[in-house]
Image (cartoon, helix red, strand yellow):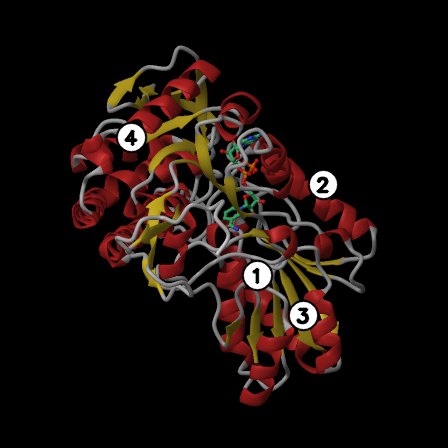
Amino acid sequence: MQVFQQYINGVFEDGSKTFESFDPSTSQSWARMPAATAADVNRAVEAAHNAFLDPTWANMSATQRGKLLVRLAELITANTPWLAELETRDTGKIIRETSSQIGYVAEYYRYFGGLADKLHGAHLPIDKPDMDVTLRREPIGVVAAIVPWNSQLFLSAVKLGPAIAAGCTVVLKASEEGPAPLLAFAKLVHEAGFPAGVVNVITGFGDDCGKTLTSHPLVSRIAFTGGPETAQHIVRNSANNLAATSLELGGKSPVVVFDDVNVDSVANSIVAGIFAASGQSCVAGSRLIVQRAIKDELLRKLAEKATQIQIGNPHDMQTEMGPLATTRQLAHIQQVVEESISQGATLVCGGKRHPTLVDGNYYLPTILDCPHKDIASIRKELFGPVLSVIAFDTEAEAIALANDSAYGLASGVFTANLTRGHRMTRAIRAGIVWVNTYRAVSPIVPFGGYGMSGLGREGGSESILDYTRTKSVWIRTSDDPIPDPFVMR
Ligand code: NAD
C-alpha cells in the first residue's frame, strides 16, 4: 500500500487522519491518503499568508516568479509518465488520456510563466491640477484552489498558474477521490524551488477541510471547480471572508448537427466528445441535437462506433475507455439511465455495466434516443458515457433545444453552411462554441460557463487579473502649502 503525504509550509508530512484510495479498475484499496483536518487547513492557510507577506516572495521580481513557473513546467514534462501513471491508478482515466493531458499541462505553466512580467498597472490622466495618480496592480492574497477528481493537474494549472504569476500564494486542495497525482505534484513544486508556504497541497473531505478552507478569514480568493451544489455551499461559506470567487461547474453541453454534414466524420467527433474520459468531463457533449433527415443514419454510425470502443485496463495503451472513477458515479448513471428509459427513451446501445469486467466500475458506452426534452438524461448532468439524442426540424428549434438547459458551459455546431454556423455562435448561450470541431482547449483561450455552469473564466491572458486588485495612488505634485480649509476664498 503506497502512502501519500500532504505538503504544508515547504514540508511533507503524514496526515494525522488518513483514508484509503481505491483503484477503480479493480475496486481494490491501493493507497493511504492524508485527510487534512481543520487544524491542518488553518496551518496551511497561515503558511500561505506568512509567505505572502514575507519579503522573499513579496519582493521577488515578476520575472523570477515566471521563471519558477517555467521550471515547474519543465519538471512536469520530465515527470509526465510518473504523474500519468498515478492519475490512471487513482481515477481509472486511461493512460493514453492522462499522458497526453499532463504533457499539455506543462504548456499552461509555461504560458502563465510568460505572462508574469507582462502584468502592469496604469498612469491615469487625472482631471485635477497638481495631482499624479497611478493604479498599482497587486496580488490579491491567499488563494484557496479546489478541484474535483477528474483532470486534477489540468484544473489546478489554470488556478495555480495565474495565481503564482500574479504574486499570490496558494492552498491547493485535491479531491478526496483520486488525489494521488496532485499530492505527487507537490514534490515537483518543492523541487522547482518555490519558497516555503507559497504553494501548499492538501486533500480532505468537503464538510471539514473544504469548508474550513473556503470560510477562512485569511483567504482572499477562491478558485473552485466541481459540482453546482458544492459551489452553492462555497458561496455561503465565503460570506465569512468575502473572498473573490470563481466557479467552474458542470455542463449538459449540446452538440447541434445539421443535415448538410459528412455524417461519418461528425460521428467521430461526437464519439470523442462524449466517450473520452468515460464521459467524466465537464465539457462532454452529452446532448446530441440532430436534424431529423440524418438522425437514423447518424445514430446507426454512432452505435457502430460506440460498440467498437476498446474497454478495459486503463493502464493499457490500447484501451480506449476505462472505468468510472467511483462507485457513487456508477450508481448515479445507472439510476438516471433507468429513469430515462421509464420516461420513454429508447436504448440504442449500452445501458448496463460491462458484462465481463465485473470487478471495476465499468459501464458500457450508452446512447439514448429521447422522444422529448423532459427525459431525465436530457436535463441532468450524468458525468458518464451516456449520449442523449433528440431530433429537430428547423434552425430555430435547434437553438431553442440547445439553450433549454440550466447549464451553459460548452456547445458544438456541425454544419457545412458557414453563415448558419455564424448565426449559431451568436444564438447559443454557452461559454464555448466549437464549430465543426469539439473539445479543443488551449492556455490562450478562456474557459467557463453561463448559468449553473459557473462564474468567471479560467485560462487566457485576462485570467491573471482575477488574482489581482488595484490600488489607486494619489500624489500631490505641488510644493505650495495646503490652504487652510476653513478660510473661504
Ligand atoms: P464536487 O463538487 O463533489 O467536489 C469538488 C471539490 O469540492 C472536491 O475537492 C471536494 O472535496 C470539494 N468540496 C466538497 N464539499 C465542499 C465544501 N462544502 N466546501 C469546499 N469544498 C468542498 O465535484 P466532483 O463530484 O468531485 O466533480 C464533478 C463535478 O465537477 C461535475 O459537476 C463536473 O461537471 C464538474 N467539473 C467542472 C469543470 C469545469 O471546468 N467547468 C471541470 C471538471 C469538473
Q: Position of residue 414 (x, y in %)?
A: 56, 77
Judge whether 315 appears above or below 433 on screen.
Answer: above
Report helix, strand or loop for mark 4: helix
Judge whether 184 appears above or below 461 on screen.
Answer: above
Q: Position of residue 48 (x, y in %)?
A: 33, 28
Separation of marks 2 and 3 at Cα, in angstroms: 23 Å
Which residue appears at 35% of the width and 29% of the height? Answer: 201
Which residue appears at 42% of the width and 65% of the height? Answer: 127
Name the amino acid type tagged 3.
Ile
Name the amino acid type tagged 2.
Gln
Work out whether mark 2 precedes mark 1 in sequence or the reverse, and give the earlier one.
1
Separation of marks 4 and 2 at Cα, in angstroms: 50 Å
Within 10 Å of the Cα at label 2, are there few (<14), some (14-19), or many (20+) other Cα atoms?
few
Judge whether 166 appears above or below 295 on screen.
Answer: above
Work out whether mark 4 precedes mark 3 in sequence or the reverse, and give the earlier one.
4
Residue 456 appears left or right of 1: right
Report helix, strand or loop for mark 3: strand
Please state which of the two labelled residues, at mark 4 or mark 2, is closer to the viewer. 4
Within 10 Å of the Cα at label 4, are there few (<14), some (14-19), or many (20+) other Cα atoms?
some
Separation of marks 1 and 4 at Cα, in angstroms: 44 Å
> Count of labels shown?
4
State whether residue 97 appears in this view: yes
| CB within 8 Å, label 2 to label 3 | no
Q: Which mark is residue 275?
A: none
Separation of marks 4 and 3 at Cα, in angstroms: 53 Å
Work out whether mark 2 precedes mark 3 in sequence or the reverse, and give the earlier one.
3
Residue that numbered label 3 is attached to: 289
Q: Nearer the viewer, residue 129 or 296?
A: 129
Name the amino acid type tagged 1.
Gly
